[in-house]
Image (spheres, rainbow, N blue to C red):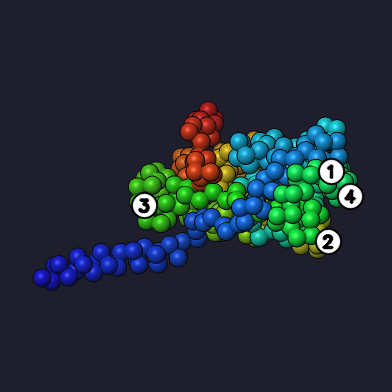
Amino acid sequence: MFRSMVLACAVLWSPILWALDLAMEPLQPIETMSVSAEQAALGKQLFFDVRLSHDNSISCASCHRLDTGGADVSRFSYGVDGRKGNMNTPTVFNAALNFSQFWDGRADSLQEQINGPLTSPLEMASSWSEVLAKLNKDDALQASAKKVCTQGLDADCVRDAIAAFEQTLVTPNARFDRYLKGDEDAITPQEKHGYALFKSYGCIACHQGRNVGGNLYQVLGVMANYFDDFPSDNPVSLGRFNVTKNPNDKHRFKVPSLRFAVLTPPYFHDGSQKNLRRTIHTMAKYQLGRKIPDDDVTAIIRFLYTLPGDYQGKTLEPKEQTQLADIKGHE
């Protein structure tokens, strides 16, 4: 009788205890967002619309490719007339979970972020007056806009629609998220070991929350001066200082999400790190002040492979773990 009661209590309390453990974890699972289907559909159309650029040559999707992890896996993207950018393009997947947008956090929302590439001379090189003049010649697009924008097809309508579409680009159901929710077999023992190392080395201090980053700013070079060793005349390397003009914000950046790190090399704000192994060693030296053995780096990368989730019902986790092949090639 007593044994039966103990077993019954264990069954009853097990989900509660797991929920308490989850609440104490520094990482949290991604959940889908509630979005107007019609507004998101309009936003998707605009996201792929080259008319947002001055010469009708590029769209948002040109740099944020959904088939390559939400970025273009180039050091710098190219804008109209082949103009080369000066900042590495981050993934658009799960951008809706970031507390600010751009490496320097100069946009507080997805809507505000859209102004940047549209007007940048290195990207779309356009203006809202030029874009709207083109879009409003499209009767079908105007009709779609009127269904979700009472004011019609204006800049706010475009921004809100694209932002709504980007809110559909969150990627739930990652293997790691399933593990957090109680599926012990969702990740392997090696991947669990990698997560434990990720926490014990201190990576978790900056890469935490639902997006495994994207929720705070940090200086690049906490434990050693990165820019003494890698001097840069690229103005974007000043980071948040370009926004605040506060000397304490020099070389301070929004911590990037690691959800798609295995899919979106190269790394850092300037795309200067070509592979994940070197990136982790660099971060260990300059952010943590320590050296991580290669075997532990391997385990951490195995953990990072559990982080991409699903989009449109299909997993975005790559079938081949090429970042591990890079490691073996350099050992």
Q: CA distance from mark 1 to mark 2?
A: 42 Å
The residue lying toward the viewer, choosing from 246 and 13, is: 13
Q: CA distance from mark 2 to mark 3?
A: 47 Å
Name which residue type carries label 1.
Lys
At 74% from the left and 49% from the top, the residue drawn is 143
Q: Which mark is residue 129?
A: 4
Mark 4 crowdedness (10 Å alpha carbons): few <14, some 14-19, many ≥20: few
Q: Visible in this render: residue 227?
A: no
Q: Visible in this render: residue 243?
A: yes
Quick one: SS at disc 3? loop
The image quadrant that residue 75 belongs to is: top right
Instruction: Nearest to the eye among marks 3 and 4: give it.
Output: 4
Instruction: Nearest to the eye among marks 2 and 4: give it.
Output: 4
Dot placed on the residue nearer the N-terminal end, 1 or 4: 4
Q: CA distance from mark 2 to mark 4?
A: 30 Å
Circles 1 and 4: CB atoms closer than 8 Å: no
Dot placed on the residue nearer the N-terminal end, 1 or 3: 1
Q: Which residue is mark 3?
A: 183
Dot placed on the residue nearer the N-terminal end, 2 or 4: 4
At 77% from the left and 48% from the top, the residue drawn is 142
Dot placed on the residue nearer the N-terminal end, 3 or 4: 4
Q: CA distance from mark 1 to mark 3?
A: 52 Å
Name which residue type carries label 3.
Asp
Q: Which mark is residue 137?
A: 1
Q: Which mark is residue 245?
A: 2
